[in-house]
Amino acid sequence: MTASEDFASLTSQFRRELLAHCYRMLGSADEAEDLVQETYLRAWRAYQGFEGRSSVRTWLYRIATNACLTAIERRGRRPLPSGLGGPGADPAAPVAAAPEVPWLQPIPDALLASPYDGPAEVAASRAGIRLAMVAALQYLSARQRAMLILRDVLDWPAAEVAAMLGTTTTAVNSGLRRARAQLARALPEEDDVAEPAEPELRALLDRFAVAFENGDVTALTALLREDVALEMPPMLTWFAGREDVRRFLTSKLFGTPGQFRLVPTMANGQPAFAAYERGPDGVYRAHGALVLTVTAAGVARIVIFLGPGLLGAFGLPPEYGRGAVRPALAPDPAAAPRPAATPGPVTARDLAVPSWPR
């Protein structure tokens, strides 16, 4: 076996979890991909000197964490609009864009999924990459982020984290207490984000897609919690409360039925939709990605990430023309495709939404 083959056999199995780690640190799927590449390049260059004093996994995490710390020092944090100011007061007023802000980005679940993960690993991975979690992490210092992720998400011993970060166990425990306290102020209570059981979740998502594609604001509003929030990075303006969200959807987002088509997927361990908007020529073109926080009481948050380039990471094409078939992009390969993208109202029977991951 050559050195290259030996290196690949030892390290390739950790690529997906390193991507998740870098994403938690950075809040950007693109930057996380770049940092994983950088991690493997640094590891390859140092491989001849690797003496096995730690596991290969620990060694790679050390390289990845240090690369992320350097990147954060150069760029800073990635917020959502709700992290930069209060909600908009007038849903009918023009919204403000802030394209210069390095916004938090979603990450497709398909990039992180591993066929070898059991239910416990899947649940832990989803919890660690939920939008609210990653957004809250952005408010911690770079080293606090690393401490909290390594200790609370990956469950590493404090002594091992201290060795990785070049500090003491006491400093890690102290920094972790501060990070937990700050995170607790930014994150919603666990009971507030508990998802409904799968049948109810699937039914709600079906109704959401039907209402959105039909431009039926009344039906869509009925699925929202009273305290729902709507965010649309790179738009700085966001809205909170069912009535303000309803007014915005009515005045700014929806035109005629059939304006949008939604393709179900998963992002950040949450149900999501890729959105396509119909142009004057009748062709549906990539518009962005919607990530939903769904609770037993309804949809608590809708984050619409605007930008046609986002959908490439989900394995979706930039457009669908008349008669094109929408693929069933979901972890269930046997899921039936959705019907042709034809304008006009749709019903739940039309959607054939694929299986959402358990």
Image: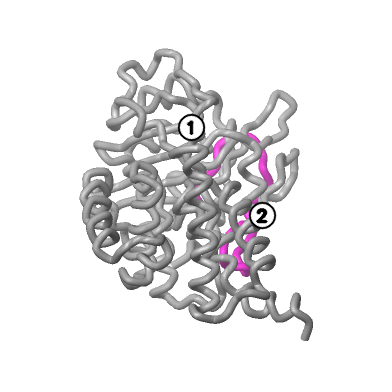
Q: Position of residue 180 (x, y in %)?
A: 24, 54
Residues 336 and 80: in front is: 80
Q: Amino acid at mark 1?
A: Pro
Q: Is residue 160 left or right of residue 35?
A: left
Q: Is residue 139 left or right of residue 356?
A: left
Residue 89 drawn above or below residue 173: above
Residue situated furthest right in the rendering: 2
The reply to whether residue 127 is in sight is no
| Colouring scheme applied when the structure was drawn | one colour
| Residue 80 painted magenta | no
Q: Position of residue 267 (x, y in %)?
A: 50, 53
As measured in the structure, the alpha-carbon distance from the residue carrying label 1 to the one carrying label 2 is: 26 Å
Magenta span main SS: loop
Q: Position of residue 191 (x, y in %)?
A: 22, 56
Q: Amino acid at mark 2?
A: Pro
Q: Which residue is mark 2?
A: 327
Q: Which residues are magenta?
A: 329-348
| Residue 346 painted magenta | yes
Q: Position of residue 155 (x, y in %)?
A: 34, 70
Q: Which residue is mark 1?
A: 233
Q: Is residue 40 left or right of residue 153?
A: right
Q: Residue at x 56, y 75 (%)?
A: 115
Which element type, helix, strand or loop, lies under badge 1? Answer: loop
Mark nearest the camera among 1 and 2 is 1
Q: Which quarter of the figure is the N terminus placed in?
A: bottom right
Label 1 vs 2, first from the N-terminus:
1
